[in-house]
Amino acid sequence: MEPVVHQVWPRVLQHLRRTLTLPQRSHSGCVENNAVTATTHSRPIRPTLLVSRLYQPSNLRDVGQDSRLQGEMTCKSQRLMQQAGLIHPSNPGCYYYLPATVRSMEKLVRVIDQEMQAIGGQKLDMPSLCSADLWKTSERWDLMGKELFRLKDRHEGDYCLGPTHEEAVTTLVAHQATLSYRQLPLLLYQITRKFRDEPKPKFGLLRGREFYMKDMYSFDVSEEAAYETYESVCQAYTRLFARLGLHCVQVQADTGNIGGTLSHEFQLPADIGEDRLLVCGNCSFSANVETVSSEITDCPHCKTGTLVESKGIEVGHTFYLGKKYSQIFNASFSNAQNKPCVAEMGCYGLGVTRILAAALEVMSTEEGIRWPGLLAPYQVCVLPPKKGSKVDGVAALADDLVHTLEKAVPCLRGEVVLDDRTQMTVGKRLKDANILGYPYVIVVGKGALEGTPRFEMICQQTDETMFLSKEGLIDLLGGVETV
Amino acid sequence: MEPVVHQVWPRVLQHLRRTLTLPQRSHSGCVENNAVTATTHSRPIRPTLLVSRLYQPSNLRDVGQDSRLQGEMTCKSQRLMQQAGLIHPSNPGCYYYLPATVRSMEKLVRVIDQEMQAIGGQKLDMPSLCSADLWKTSERWDLMGKELFRLKDRHEGDYCLGPTHEEAVTTLVAHQATLSYRQLPLLLYQITRKFRDEPKPKFGLLRGREFYMKDMYSFDVSEEAAYETYESVCQAYTRLFARLGLHCVQVQADTGNIGGTLSHEFQLPADIGEDRLLVCGNCSFSANVETVSSEITDCPHCKTGTLVESKGIEVGHTFYLGKKYSQIFNASFSNAQNKPCVAEMGCYGLGVTRILAAALEVMSTEEGIRWPGLLAPYQVCVLPPKKGSKVDGVAALADDLVHTLEKAVPCLRGEVVLDDRTQMTVGKRLKDANILGYPYVIVVGKGALEGTPRFEMICQQTDETMFLSKEGLIDLLGGVETV
């Protein structure tokens, strides 16, 4: 047998090495402290993230003076998010998502991607501009009324801004002339900006006119297979909300203008919820009041329990559509006998921006934001002492600590910020940290001067404080999950 | 000194452990092979990615039969992208981005994020719906003419779909009443869908009506500081294109309807390019012809070289805006003397979908797609032998190889697909792999039966083939950069 020679392979190696000869980075004074300069490696080493440069928590102290709280504050999450510089109002029902919100949203998108891909979801991206023809074919052009944003292009063609994409995705699949039963179930989803001309936008990100939604569409060979897919998506939603620490209820729901024969909502119980739910005290039955006759007070499932009303925020919605859209647009596949058959469909929505706002609504206190741990924009905030104070000397230890933590706990890379606004007292900065809701706040104070330096660790999720050595901090933070 | 006690901290630990008690995953037959079930850990172990389940390369063989090549094919990248199931046409100038494109785009977005954040960029997300008032204030409501998509909401309010966001971002910054000179430079950017009603959309993703753009806006204390920021963004663009392996030219450009006094384009030389460039053969001078008087043939910079014309695709554009927008909207900061000063601005665009299509346009062959290595949807494709062939027995080795590679080279996690369409010959599947352009294709054939199994490795970027042991493969692929 001839020996395996690992030949020199110049072109490929040259190809792989190309990225190592990039121009050097140089720019002064941005968010990242450029004292630590980036290396030639293509993934830049992260310099310390400084709170003083972050847009825009550094202005929390001055809330009264600026216009951050302009407009009517209709609920707690809206007020806190505007106050903390997470969102800024634009047109009615439209918001700027400021940097911390974008970080949180990106984490939420990653969690959703993981859960959708774990059940076979494939991510695509469909146009926002939807032609009127498609919507007329499904007869929803008229049905949707004023909720649809409509516009004309330069050639007088009629379009709407897609609030949902049943027509678009069904046409796409219909265009694939060679879809085989072996390729089903096919689960296609997107996480994109959607538009809906709400009559009364309110509650900040909870009911806006422009928002992010995850919409998934399934194609199956039979009703049985479609029900199995439906069930697997509901399970994925349940896992998703569990990972976020949100206690959602899956309730029987109305199919509305989407259509179909079976539907569930995922409701997060909350006082400001706009949906009214009936929950059985005896069994697992729960339903949106819309689906239950007003005379019924006893549970239709167990027959013995009484239905109790509560309020909820709808954060997810699933629909079994059957052949409603696939028939109209002829989305078909070849069966085992090579005969064309119309696919069975389902559609499944998650309100991405709404999940974020709803989570803050139910988790936050009146004074400060509390995040689902996975979604906090930054996990850890390190506070050095006030400049000129007696323990001023330990300031360098705080900077060290940031780097030590990021090195010892890889998943904290880019997750640790230094509150370098040392012209402010520790107390004032702790108040800001409370408003912003970092899950972990570490105060570097006089304990850091001891033989074995100790640090004050405040876990804002559980409201506990303790003193830990550097090893203790690493040990505890090693258990933090990030995404 | 008292010893540091690492206390039991029940609530926090309970909190951290919460994610470990999730319901089990179960769903049959999707993209991922469910023989390997997910664990209780929240980050699911990736099962083998099967080509037969990917949407939609499995239908490559049937290109002639379906409508994938509907519409006029105006350039190579459009034809290849439609043929390979990367995009599907919707309305004129609008495309569905199919799953492989979304993967590639997400990688491009990560590279852009890295480069923008390395110079201090902070990512936000602004509404697509822009009120007419803002655009009337800047006098662009009329100036933009038919390029602007315009619409009315249910209250007869006038809006446009933002093609660019100078007005929106300047208003945002103006609303922050307490911006200090210490917080500048402030670099805010977004990567979002933009809208432009092109008179003649063409060239696939190169000139569409709906596309993704990265737009960054800078705010500085002085003209000098603004120039420094401008320069640092140009350097970041240069690094970005170098990492993608794109040889772009930075040319002097016209400021168009954006305004300002200094502007550069980043042009990728290409035959189908719609911009005409003049490049000096003697020095580094290069300019868009729009900026040079038609009588000039000698280089205005070195005075000795002759200007030669070539064509380019504009993939980036930078503008020094001065106070054009900040004056109108009063975006100001407090200087060191606590006096309000109007900020100096710049704006910087990158055509995200356009970079992707332009890269494929210049890198691909007529027969097959070639990706910038960093942006390939999947890095490696493993091909087991045809079912029923003499070496059928090594099929299990192919599946093993996928897992071995993902384990031994962590950055290949989720980057290795198995072409399980073993009813097809290796030759036919190699042809598909050529069209789809995986950078690395590994054929598991009779060499795998040797004492030390050998595998055929085809590097499609450099068009080289060699035979390697498993260790040799790991060694070579260990040098691949992913993002």
Image (tube, coloured by chain):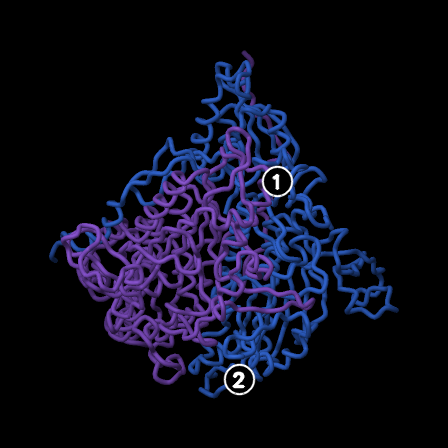
Chain colours: A purple, B blue
Residue under disc 2 on the same chain as residue under disc 1: no
Pick the residue in front: B230 or A38: B230
Q: CA distance from mark 2 to mark 1?
A: 49 Å
Q: Residues within 10 Å of mark 1 (few under 14, many from 20)?
A: some
**How many labels sit on residues?**
2
Q: Amino acid at mark 1?
A: His
Q: Is residue B202 left or right of residue B150?
A: right
Could you say whether the residue bearing mark 2 is in a helix, strand or loop? loop
On screen, residue B12 above or below A271: above
Residue at the extreme left of the image, as rendered: B2
- Where does the image place residue A95, in percent across and percent down from the top left? 44, 71
Q: Is residue A237 left or right of residue B199?
A: left
Q: Amino acid at mark 2?
A: Asn
Pick the residue in front: B390 or A317: A317
Dot 1 corresponds to which residue?
A15
Q: Is residue B460 left or right of residue A165?
A: right
- Where does the image place residue A224, in percent across and percent down from the top left? 38, 38
Dot 2 corresponds to which residue?
B330
Could you say whether the residue bearing mark 1 is in a helix, strand or loop? helix
Residue at position x 43%, y 38% in the image: A222
Q: Is residue B112 left or right of residue A311?
A: right
Image quadrant where one finds the N terminus of chain A: top right
Read off the chain for label 1: A
